Amino acid sequence: MRLQDKTAIVTGAASGFGAGIARRFAAEGARVMVADLAADAALALAQEIDGVAHGVDVADDAQVKAMAAGALERWGRVDILVNNAGITHLPTPLEEVDEATFDRVLAVNAKSVYLTARHLVPAMKAAGAGAILNVASTAGLSPRPRLNWYNASKGWMITATKAMAVELAPAGVRVNALCPVAGETPLLPSFMGGDTPELRAKFLATIPIGRFSTPEDLANAALYLCSDEASMVTGVALEVDGGRCI
């Protein structure tokens, strides 16, 4: 029960890495808000883990404000924020990614971190404590060709994590990032440009440990970074990637 009596918001929590993190946090004693654009799926998971569901587009200021207000009204505080919601574009030459796709990738992967900070950091500062975890990617450290603007959005997230960490440390708020390699999540076919045994073999050949990340892998790392055990850890971008970035 390493998160006993903690409160947590996990965005993009209805599936994939976010669902793994939400389940693990609840199992460790946290009260979890399952926040996701897919409101029905969020409700199903919230019922499973005895949490609360909230439908939200994390790129929309008014919706993020309402999410934060709902959590603060319900709990009086938010101890942990996991910015997990993210999207990608299909593998495409960088000059051929259309503007609408670029805008949406940057809005969901980058602007969302700004919006959640805008609406939740003041309460964390007032409490003198808090843990923020941004789910970035190995793509932000070692970019893959043709995932160009997705790579850039995750690099932005890593820099934002460090900027937030150094600014918020005196207020008692820690900020860290996770950098998973692609995993068994709904986004996997988008990263690979399809899903065939041949594409999987090619992708896995770049991961020394020889498998994809799992929601459980990310949940274990997130649990540590968001727990009091990591009270001296801030500003890190932890690679959970089977050696992909070596």
Image (cartoon, grey):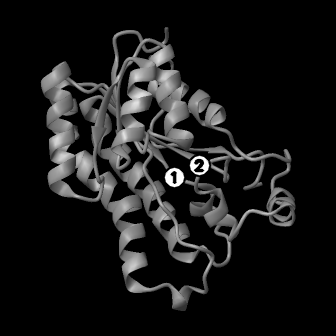
* Residue at image location 42% in from the left, 77% down from the top: 102
Give the SS element for disc 2. strand
Q: Name the foreground residue: 144 vs 45.
A: 45
**Does 43 appear above or below 165?**
above
* Residue at image location 66% in from the left, 62% down from the top: 189
> Does residue 142 appear in this view?
no
Give the SS element for disc 1. loop
x, y percent for residue 158: 48, 55
x, y percent for residue 187: 58, 57
Q: How far is mark 2 from mark 1, CA to CA?
A: 5 Å
**Does 38 appear above or below 91?**
above
Left or right of 19? Residue 64 is: left
Q: Quadrant of the rendered structure where residue 106 is?
A: bottom left
Residue 136, numbered label: 1
Q: Name the foreground residue: 90 vs 1.
A: 90
Residue 179, numbered label: 2
Residue 57, numbered label: none
* Residue at image location 67% in from the left, 77% down from the top: 145
x, y percent for residue 75: 20, 20
Q: Residues within 10 Å of mark 2 (few under 14, many from 20)?
A: many
> Does residue 141 appear in this view?
yes
* Three-letter amino acid code of the residue under disc 2: Cys
Contact (Cβ within 8 Å) of mark 2 with mark 1:
yes
Left or right of 106? Residue 237 is: right
For marks 2 and 1, the one nearer the N-term is 1
**Does 20 appear above or below 115?**
above
* Three-letter amino acid code of the residue under disc 1: Ala
**Does 193 appear above or below 85?**
below
Q: Name the foreground residue: 242 vs 54.
A: 54
